[in-house]
Image (cartoon, helix red, strand yellow):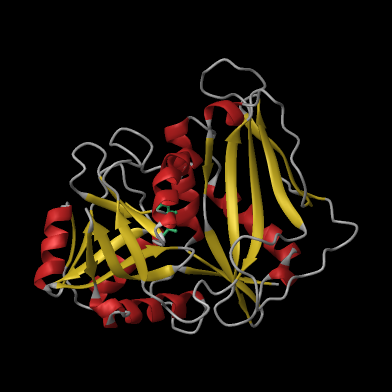
Amino acid sequence: MEIRIEKAKTLKEKPDFSKLGFGKYFTDHMFVMDYKNGEWQDARIVPFGYIPIHPASTVLHYGAEIFEGMKAYKTADGFQMFRPYENARRMNNSAERLCLPQIDEEFFVKAITELIKLDYEWIPDLPGTSLYIRPFTFGNDEALGVHAVHNATFVVILSPVGNYYAEGLNPVKISIEHEDVRAVRGGTGYAKCGGNYAASLRAGKRAEEKGISQVLWLDGVERKYIEEVGSMNVMFKINGEIITPKLTGSVLPGITRKSCIEILKDWGYKVSERLISVDELCAAAKEGTLEEAWGTGTAAVVSPIGHLFYEGKDYEVSGNKIGELTQKLYDELTGIQWGKKPDERGWVVKVRV
Ligand SMILES: *Cc1c(COP(=O)(O)O)cnc(C)c1O
């Protein structure tokens, strides 16, 4: 499919790249295409702006929406992306679960590549900065009946983002949630969809009011097994072994998670993807065998956990400092993503501009 390009008549002023924060600024253009009569059509790059939406649109009433989160990094002669075909595949898995139309994986990457080429000047070049890419698809039938959608819209927007950790890698406080649940097996937990986030906001707000940055979810049935953190997967180093919750269907299959597992195995660590109960975790923290804990996700890459709160108790991890392995993993992964370390596993897609 051809991509029609309509350039913005006036370009926006760029923000100060040293004060970007996360997801606050957007580039000059966006990619849009519509799904009608059983096929994607009118692929176009247009000036960034509002999307007109019918008041009865499916997404507004029944939450038919999926998204992806990925990053592009500036290089000497263009930019590079980290495992974009993994995002394309996951987006299609999410689409299958929510009965939204899938997108050809090559075309998904091509659409993003063409958009970034046009807004290339927006990729920040300061250390730790990148261009965050947010592709999303939403159901867009203009009727209130409940059924799998016939019409959908796919959009890609771009946002220059700063270093997640302005003052280095600071350990975060995490509260283990025992009331609300995020997802259940058979539900949409493994799909990257807006609805999962809607269900998580209340617990997140309660934690925030106590000065705690994120929530660690337990499984939705027994509320016994660790699942994941708000927008990150989670890993623990207990007695030298790396343990991460297995993908049971209610956990989002993170690409950072997958990459960390591969790197850790290459380094000779024993990595177990298995069920881990909150009791096992708290016992390890009490006995001092919980050596390190960290979250993994595209936005923060690797995020050390310094405190775990559960049922009124406060468990400190690694003396509230970043663990040695957490730091090593962060350096390795960001090194590959920023092009400062060799890409031995063929994860990086380079584009010349
Ligand atoms: C996106 C996301 C992650 C992390 O996935 P990455 O591919 O590593 O960015 C983890 N949990 C949830 C709920 C997510 O939405």
Residue depicted at 33% across the width and 61% down the height: 174
Residue at the far right in the pictured view = 9
Which image quadrant for residue 36? top right
x and y percentages locating residue 308 in the rendered image? 27, 63
Residue at the far top in the pictured view = 145
Task: Evaluate whether residue 34 shows in this view.
Answer: yes
Q: Which quarter holds ligand 1?
A: bottom left
Residue depicted at 67% across the width and 71% down the height: 123
**Is 14 situated left or right of 70 in this image?**
right
Q: Quadrant of the N terminus?
A: top right
In the image, 3 versus 293, the foreground residue is 293
Q: Is residue 273 above or below residue 285?
A: above
Which image quadrant for residue 181? top left
Q: Is residue 92 above or below residue 143?
A: below
Residue depicted at 74% across the width and 64% down the height: 119
x and y percentages locating residue 84 in the rendered image? 51, 59
Q: Is residue 352 above or below residue 278?
A: below
**Is 305 situated left or right of 164 in this image?**
left
**Is 106 situated left or right of 123 in this image?**
left
